[in-house]
Image (cartoon, rainbow, N blue to C red):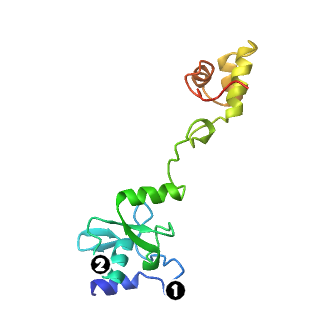
């Protein structure tokens, strides 16, 4: 089977210009369509771009306007540098925005208000770090860092 025939076999049956063309073939661990050429695996959207635009990408990246990693619709693809890709990600709020402190950090187990409460309760002298840790379901060391302002430094007493 010819290379292009194998590629076309992995496209959806209905191809309209506006919809995403979901790749029907293999998907890599990052969620992108994968296409093998000999012993090499390449991203399906790159092949789509080069086939439909008859233009090699060379060192450029193939970017998605639609942000659908499985999409191979050439109308949804454009070529760009890594800088263009990073700007596109920031513009679409798909990456680090600069503010990942406290509750804005996806790994944070506590809200900013809870941190304020913990500091107030600890400073009242009624609770130990261990008691507060159990109350808020965090380790007592986390409470230590909070009350000694080694973490959540940006949170002012309120």
Give the vertical position of 134 relative to 2 (above or below): above
Q: Which secondary structure, mark 2?
A: loop
Can you identify the residue that label 1 sits on?
Answer: 16
Give the vertical position of 116 relative to 19 (above or below): above
Q: Position of residue 21 (x, y in %)?
A: 48, 78
Q: Quadrant of residue 107?
A: top right
Give the vertical position of 12 relative to 146 (above or below): below
Q: Residue at x 63, y 19 (%)?
A: 147
Q: Position of residue 70 (x, y in %)?
A: 46, 70
- Give me the disc on residue 55: 2
Q: As rendered, which of 82 and 27 lies closer to the eye?
A: 82
Q: Between marks 2 and 1, how big is the CA–CA gap?
A: 21 Å
Few, some or many residues within 10 Å of mark 2 (<14, 14–19, 20+)? few
- Give me the disc on residue 31: none
Screen quadrant of the C terminus: top right
Sequence-wise, the earlier of marks 2 and 1 is 1
């Amino acid at each position: 089977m010819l290379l292009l025939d194998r590629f076309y076999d992995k496209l959806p049956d209905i191809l309209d210009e506006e919809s995403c063309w979901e790749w029907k073939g293999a998907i890599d661990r990052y969620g992108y369509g994968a296409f093998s050429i000999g012993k090499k695996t390449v991203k399906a959207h790159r092949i789509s771009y080069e086939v439909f635009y008859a233009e090699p990408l060379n060192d450029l990246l193939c970017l998605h306007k639609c942000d659908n990693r499985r999409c191979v619709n050439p109308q949804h693809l454009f070529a760009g540098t890594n800088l263009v890709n990073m700007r596109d990600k920031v513009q679409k709020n798909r990456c680090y925005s600069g503010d990942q402190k406290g509750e804005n950090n996806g790994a944070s187990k506590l809200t900013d208000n809870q941190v304020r409460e913990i500091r107030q309760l600890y400073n009242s002298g009624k609770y130990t770090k261990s008691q507060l840790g159990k109350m808020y379901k965090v380790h007592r060391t986390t409470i230590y860092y909070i009350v000694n302002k080694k973490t959540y430094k940006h949170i002012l007493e309120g």
